[in-house]
Image (cartoon, grey):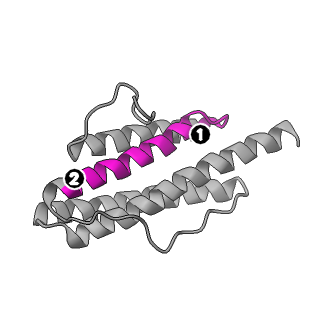
Amino acid sequence: MSEESETAGDAVSVLAEALRAEYAAVYAYEFVGGSAGDEDRRSRGLALAGEHKSTRAELREAMLDRDGSPPAVRPTYPLPSDKDGRSIDDFVVGVENTCARAALWLTAADDTDLRTTGTRLLQEATVRALEWGGELDSLPGFEGS
């Protein structure tokens, strides 16, 4: 395998992981938008579903630009059993932490455009997690930080 094709393979791999996280985020926020116990959370959920759909489209395009095949969307993703405010907030913070971890892998890509995208997505996911009541980790996106 040439160095160029190894780099493209790495890019496709990290893009696939980021896309999987975005698929789950869209599913999660659409659930929140339709099921949260209060209007504010439902409105925020629907708005953020739209943001994650835009990110999903951006990552899908980046995947196709690198001759990759976007991963399949799963028919369902884990959802919280309760729809009360704290359960929804905790659920969404977990979703954003997953997106942050996937974005972190993009920041380590050889491809400069992917690193830039990953940095922006890591920042966005961290801010969203904080807005839903998450705590700021010293190293967002890292497990156990």
Image quarter hosting the C terminus: top left
For this orientation, the residue located farthest to the front is 81
Residue 20 is inside the magenta segment: no
Taking the image as shown, residue 134 lies to the left or right of residue 98, namely left
Q: For residue 88: magenta?
A: yes
Q: Position of residue 86 (x, y in %)?
A: 16, 53
- For the point 29% across and 45% down, which residue is it? 128
Asked if residue 144 is positioned above or below residue 117 in the image, the reply reads above
Q: Which mark is residue 113?
A: 1
Mark 1 belongs to which amino acid? Asp
Q: Looking at the picture, does residue 114 appear above or below residue 140?
A: below
Residue located beneath label 2 in the image: 89
Identify the image quadrant of the N terminus.
top right
- Asked which secondary structure carries label 2, the reply is helix
Judge whether 9 appears above or below 35 on screen.
above
Give the residue drawn at x 47%, y 36%.
119
The residue mark sitting in front, 1 or 2, is: 2
Q: Earlier in the sequence, mark 1 or mark 2?
A: 2
